[in-house]
Amino acid sequence: MSHLVGHRCVECGRLMNPRHLRCLDCNGREFEEVPPEGECRLITYSEITSLPWGIDERSRILGVVEFENGLKALGWLRTDKAKMGMRLNAGWGPVRVVGGEEVYGLTLVPAKSSSRTR
Amino acid sequence: MRGVAIVGVGMIPFGRRDEDTLVDMLSYAALNAMDDAGIGDMPIDAAYVGNMGAGLFNHQTAVASSLVDRINLFPAAAESVENGPASGGSALKNGVLAVASGYFDLVLVVAGEKMREVVGPRATDVVATMTHPQAEYIYGATLPSMAGMFARLYMPKYGITAEHLAKVAIKNHSNGLLNPYAHIHSRITLEGILTSPHAIVNNPFVADPIRLYDCCPVSDGAAACLLCPIEMVAQFKKPAIAVAGFGQATDTHTLQEREDPTDLKAVRLAARQAFDMAKLSPGDVDVAELHDAFTILEIAESEHVGFFEKGEGAKALERGQTQIGGSLPINPSGGLKARGHPVGATGVAQAVELTWQLRGEAGQRQVKNAEVGFSVNFGGFGNNVVAFVLRRES
């Protein structure tokens, strides 16, 4: 995967991430790819201060976000301070080395309008 | 289906057991269960071995075959059962089904894990391999961080505070002091872990709002149960404990795909199945072992299985209802929090504790007149859950 993409069931319209081969609602097997749209909103998060082997940082904030088109994903918040409901801009970058290879994933930075919450 | 009984249980003290291999630990627990039942040289038909991570923790696979060889169970059928932290519960369920079906009569269920063979961050990483590989693991997600994200939503929704979480830890550490098999034997106080100025040093955040003392320890250990059909129980020396009901349910791998991420659906469904099969209700339970890998889970599970309404679990804790001597003691063993959590072992360790409680053999932590016990073994972050109702046979 070179970027974040959701999968919408052609049958019932349910939007899923990660990918499934049968729709979680209707068991449909045809999907269309749906990229994230717009800013995203932080649904929940946790700052990890006891990180697993291979991540040499003092702490890392992970959070679940929801994009304006309903796509949800976990990502790495590149900020020191998180707040429930804060608005974030999404990027794509290296998040971890797994098996000797750099793996890319969703990175999140506060939107310029991050004081807005809803 | 035939009724199934637990006729022997065994365990070894949980903790750091540098002197033992994984198969040593499984063997000791198995022999303890066989001796407890007094089976002598009776042949065991099958062995189900619950284990989550021997391949990663110990560089060993095919553990069940190794156990059979170590304690001479030949030619018993044997297989390993892996279901993350619910591996023990799944092994027990599979053993129960094998006896209930009539195919096997005498079945040994053993479960264990040797986690302390690797350093802490490595253990954290091994356990994290149960998260979604592309959607969670790559970001460095850990099980405490999953609990942290869950707690951040669940706590304000249901009025749960950091003090409530600390009180779960204090209760379970207190219970663990009464359990010679517990990993942790230390009394903790609210001042020491939450309210004093130095509490943040004693009890730092691991994955906020989850602190160190909200987490179970990383443990080595093993536990075992011997099963047979109800009609055979007279052949064994100990009072029989019936497996009155069991249930197992699953939920989405990732938290983000749950319609309501504060709803532990698999816990609800597994518990309901177990109660329906047993023809009992949550109000019939005298003692429970819940999967408190994180303190928030003891409260949330106590609500999801139907012991308390949503938002009432923490209040019940405050009132002392869940203490030994309360109206519904939860985790008299010390739970995962103090007895320890050798991940694959836990589901069977819960059944061992309930068996001791229902027989009246739990020593200083005995719950008076306990006749019905209940357990929840929580796999993944709630995506694969096994529940049991055990009942003392008259």
Image: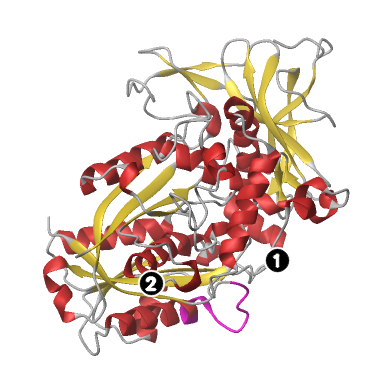
Q: Is residue B32 left or right of residue B129?
A: left
For label 2, the residue is B224
Q: Quadrant of residue B40?
A: bottom left
Which residue is at 54% across, 64% downward?
A: B342
**In this view, A67 is above or below B50:** above
Query: Nearer the N terminus, badge 2 or badge 1?
Result: 1
Main secondary structure type of the part rendered in magenta? loop
Which stretch is magenta?
B15-24
The number of callouts visible is 2
**Quadrant location of the C terminus of chain A?**
top right
**In this view, A34 is above or below B311:** above
Which residue is at 60% across, 84% downward?
A: B19
Q: Quadrant of residue A102?
A: top right
Can you name the residue that lies furthest to the bottom here? B41
Magenta highlight on residue B19: yes
Asked if one can make out residue B145 in the rendered structure from this viewpoint, the answer is: no
Query: Which mark identifies residue B119?
Result: 1
Which residue is at 68% across, 67% downward?
A: B186
Q: Chain of mark 1?
A: B
Magenta highlight on residue A64: no
Label 2 to label 1, Cα distance in Å? Answer: 27 Å
**In this view, A49 is above or below B347:** above
Q: Chain of mark 2?
A: B
Q: Secondary structure at mark 1?
A: loop
- Three-letter code, disc 1: Val
Q: Which marked residue is nearer to the observer: mark 2 or mark 1?
A: 2
Whole-percent x, y for residue B346 in the image: 47, 61
